[in-house]
Image (spheres, grey):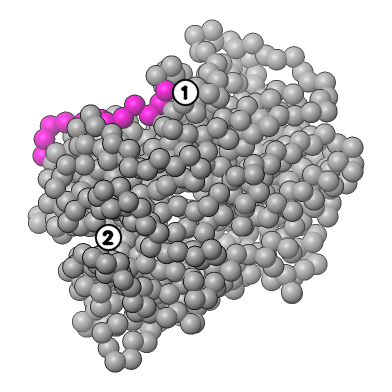
Amino acid sequence: MLTRYSFVLAALVTGVLLSGCGKNPEPAPPAEQSSSASIPQYSAEQFFATKTYFGNDINHDNSAMLVASDETGVFNLYRVSLDGKNWQPLTQSTTDPAFPISWFPNDDRLLYTADQGGNELNHVYLREVDGTVRDLTPGDKLKASFAGWHDDGSFFITSNERDPRFFDLYHYNSQDYGRKLIYQNDDGYSINDISKDGRYLALSKERTNADNNLFLVDLSSDSPNPVLITEHQGNVSHQVYGFTPDNNALLFGANGSGEFVAAYSYNLQTGTTSTYSQADWDISFIYFSEDKQYRVQGVNADASTVINITNLNDGKALKLPTLPAGDLRSVSFSDDSKYMSFYLNADNSPSNLYVWQVGSPEAQRLTQALDSSINEQHLVQSEVVRFNSFDDLTIPALLYKPHQANSNAKVPALIWIHGGPGGQSRTGYSPMIQHLVNHGYAILSVNNRGSSGYGKTFYHLDDLRHGEDDLQDIVYGKKYLQQLDWVAGDRIGVIGGSYGGYLTMAAMAFTDEFKAGINIFGVTNWVRTLESIPPWWESFRESLYAELGDPAVDGERLRLISPVFHGDKVQKPVLVVQGANDPRVLQVESDEMVAAIRANNVPVEYVLFDDEGHGFLKKSNRIKAQKAYLAFLKQYL
């Protein structure tokens, strides 16, 4: 179902990865020797020899899964036997990564998605059984995505080819791939899901970043117009999980009854809404096995995902076999629910693919993602910590302590800032973090105010105050680190990507707290960024403005918090990294920031990838990136 495919693709977190190294060196303190001779320092090449996998859809006859791997340096697709012994390449791209969508329901044709050089203009591609590939969404400037399967084996795709601002819905024939426009989206709705019988369409529409509504369209009616199904008072955020397998209800999440997102069921026949599921944290997703036997629910519990699988025949939790420590990810059942495929991920272990014959005593591990030269016992598990900010607000964070750190061998540290602004630093393997920690840098991944996962009040505390209160959370993260007797309190830097790159530059321009900063495709000119958002963001433009500011109204404040206008205040070394094809943070943002710092005669390094966008996917670039981090930090921190 759509939710499952969405989460497979969403799993591709834009790992903020870069390349290059510093020039204009300034004297650095002597390198500290590791106090633990038993912990070797691994190279960037070793960490990125680690394989990354996405997708695990099981085909119609339970003979294979559809998996993407970056083993060749670029993500390509593979047909993987359920015992893991046969990996058949299905694509051979050397440039643009390919990511899996799904097998066809009744044969080994498949759908996948790819963009061009990181421009985020994804197309949907069909691969025939004989290997022939066809672009189902041809065009130069359109963006398309898979929207779900129909019960009869046909499928749905959204595309903004008619109007670059909005996505329309097309129904594709699975035989000749002819298509029909079935919903023309003139009013700026977001298309969230379509029922498997093709009758109902779930839409959402933003009012602000704190309030939106869900709508239902009966495509079989004479006048298929959106009908509001979430009438409410005040600010309530809603999200669609998906239609139930019997096409009788729409499941959605809402935070109207408390701080966190609970699940609700809207009955398509009676039009009534009832509570479906509740948890102590946000319910992130709910989806079902194809045969309607199992329900999978994920909860974002304090920066980790807790998955519950329920047998709907008896209402009991599915008893899983004994597994290594870690979080389950991308749980997927075969059509008959005889097999379950999933990934297992931990801070010190990248996602490995498993297959379990349901009910058997053991699950079979099919991959060795971590390079064999690295001992995962030498890697570090994060610890969830909390500290008080300037106003006594409790700020959650993840702390990574190098093995070699102790009170007699203090280590330098980095504040890590996630993107968003409403993102979240979460547990799980990061080769970038582990490489830096392995080389003796402590990392504190701060979930500053405005981060998701900690309730709606916390989430909205930074609205129209970006670069102000959330920046102080970063400063107080530094103060927290300085209280640890194993951290060198005078050698603390800051690093982040996207919005985290912005806060990094804000920290370097508006405070004198950090010895060095690494800005990875960070916003530096909010006026231009908000005026030049990609056209396909139009449906949530007002929501974006409610959170960050309208450049036509709030231009003065946005200039005050934009580091590019304050380059003369940057006094410490900075590394800036950018993808030339980034549609979100344009290259000119980084060009001008670098020029502003250089004009002040402060060391600044600039690394530009010609073949990347908002996040770096090619393995060779990621290796160069990691070397750049380390070279810069050794030089300046």
Numbered disc total: 2
| x 70%, y 38%: residue | 607
Dot in front, 1 or 2: 2
Q: Is residue 58 above or below residue 139?
A: above
- For label 1, count other residues whose C-alpha is less than 10 Å away and answer few (under 14), some (14-19) or many (20+): many
Residue behind mark 2 = 1
Task: Tell me if 228 is positioned left or right of 527 in this view.
Answer: left
| x 40%, y 59%: residue | 135
Does the magenta run of residues contain 545? no
| x 81%, y 25%: residue | 25
Nearer to us in this view, 276 or 615 = 615
Can residue 175 be seen in the rendering of this structure?
A: yes
- Main structural element of the magenta stretch: helix, strand or loop? loop
Boundaries of the magenta span: 359-371
Residue kind at label 2, given as amino acid type: Met
- For label 2, count other residues whose C-alpha is less than 10 Å away and answer few (under 14), some (14-19) or many (20+): many
What is the secondary structure assignment of the residue under circle 2? loop
Q: Is residue 622 above or below residue 37?
A: below
| x 18%, y 68%: residue | 152
Q: CA distance from mark 1 to mark 2?
A: 36 Å
Residue kind at label 1, given as amino acid type: Leu
Mark with earlier residue (1, 2)? 2
Where residue 379 is drawn, which disc sits there? Answer: 1
Residue 575 falls in which quadrant of the image?
Answer: top right
Q: Is residue 247 above or below residue 479?
A: below
Q: Quadrant of the C terminus?
A: top right
Q: Position of residue 358 (x, y in %)?
A: 13, 41
Q: Position of residue 419 (x, y in %)?
A: 58, 50
